[in-house]
Image (tube, rainbow, N blue to C red):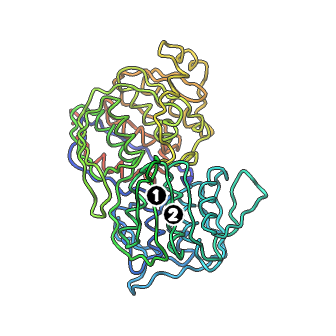
Amino acid sequence: MTQPSVQSFPERPVPQATALTGEATLPANRDLTLVALALGARCRGVTRILRAVPHPDVNAFVENLARIGIQVSREADTLLVGTENGEAPELKSSEEPLDAGDSRIHFACLAGLLAGAPFSQPVTCSIDRKILRPVLDALEALDVRLQTDANDPGVALIVGIGGRRPKKGTVRLESVDEAVKAAIFLAGLAVEGATICYQPGAGDETVEPLFKSAGCLVEKERVSDEEGYRLELSGPSAPNGVEHDLPGDPDGALYLILTAALLPKSEMILTNVGVDWKSRRIVEVARRMNAELAVERARTTSRFPIRRITVKGSELRATRFGAELTQLFLNEIPFLSIIGACANGEAIIRDAIALRNGWSPELTDENETSQDTESGAENDVSPDGEASSKADSHEPDPGAGDTLAVTVTALRDLGVKVGEMPDGLVVQGGYILQGTTLDARNEERVAVALLLAGMAAEGTTIVQNSGSVDDYYGPILEIADNLAQKRRVKA
């Protein structure tokens, strides 16, 4: 996630609402948008990506493409990459290194795109090498030229990618990893022969439909006598520019589904919900919290499997988050904490120590998390009150980018009883929030939580210092505002 600049914004009033009603469509999945942009850079003709709303991560990728000669334009919420002359864009070297920031999928897409370039292009990335290792190993299996700076083993600085043509090869994944698949499929477009990938499960239908819709020959079959699948991309391939109707972004699904469930008179229909790992877990968590959901299967015009979800106002139950489940929803922890205050019971959140460091990178790719991990919370926190006594011993310090401390302060300003631990929170539920003035301290993840959960507070909630929340969450806030049935204030 690209780190925003710290800004102070005017106060934002949040009127009380009784419901989210009507139908809304989620904006496109951001990770898939990056893959579609990279694929479009190799396609003949124009690639159109629907509902690709502006976001700092997408904007940064578009800027990197421009540095290597790939121009991207925008028509409302549609991104266009490629040329009308029917030829594939020509990659050009950039004197300045490309910067993938702290995004693993950003790096994977750039690396795959540049793998077959006739030049070596410097790319920097501020992620520990061990997190990038599966991507690097997979590309090396295709004989992609990678020159790395070995001076700093902690932060990966890729000195050069490209300079020779990749060769056919086989990659075996220890877990289903969409970033690795994106990298090797993009590199495989230049390979004479087959690029083969074995993965331990069926995985998400995400990367494969993108390449199939562009005319690439991608085969997927179950491996006999093994718990796994074999994927094969035949190359070389000259894909065609097409229109990509992508499934929705999972983060938006979480915010809208639980906000609708929180408001008592809601009846919201949310379309274009993906079936990726995180989106599936969102539905499971919402149901565990007693949200009333009706789920229907559908497909986008690009043949991606999606879900259409109807959400009604519900009596929510608090739940527990820990270990990998916390990592999967790390950026949404402030929101889940406030939802927990309105639910019945006690919400316990553990293993969120990364939020003590403010705006953190995406520590784990959503596709790498594949097991239910609420046990992490259950093993460390007993339901008999022990967690609360531990929590009370840690005093909040709502400064220096401590997202958990900012969340605790906001909860207490809302009148909620909350205990704080070094790595998490214990939130007493059952509260009817009272509208008040809250300070998000330029923490966008806290700001979006307060702006959405504030709809359930009695009276008007004022959110101060919301930072760059519109850059990251603007489309979701707009959908919520459009669907909100606001309570009329008596004169």
Which percent across, then down, holds residue 444? 49, 45
Which label sits on residue 47? none
Q: Secondary structure at mark 2?
A: strand
Residue linked to disc 1: 230
Please count the marks in the image: 2
Question: Which residue lies at the image location 34% right of the left edge and 29% below the top edge?
Answer: 289
Q: Secondary structure at mark 1?
A: strand
Q: Is residue 31 above or below residue 465?
A: below
Q: Residue furthest top?
A: 384
Image position of 320 with respect to 96: above or below: above
Quadrant where the C terminus is found in the figure: top left
Answer few, some or many: residues within 10 Å of disc 1's Cα (few below 14, many 20 plus, some between 14 and 19).
some
Q: Residue furthest right?
A: 151
Residue 93 higher or lower than 204, as above or below: below
- As drawn, is 228 to the left or to the right of 363? left
Q: Are marks 2 and 1 in contact (CB under 8 Å)?
A: yes
The extreme bottom residue here reads 85
Towards the viewer: 75 or 104: 104
The kind of residue on which mark 1 rests is: Arg
Q: Is residue 260 left or right of residue 438?
A: left
Which mark is first along the chain, 1 or 2? Answer: 2
| Above/below status of 171 relative to 122 | above
- In the rendered image, which quarter is residue 392 located in? top right
Please state which of residues 131 and 237 is positioned toward the viewer in this rendering: 237
Asked whether 336 or 5 is in front, the reply is: 336
Q: Could you tell me the amino acid type at mark 2? A: Ile
Please state which of residues 443 and 203 is positioned toward the viewer in this rendering. 203
Residue 196: numbered disc: 2
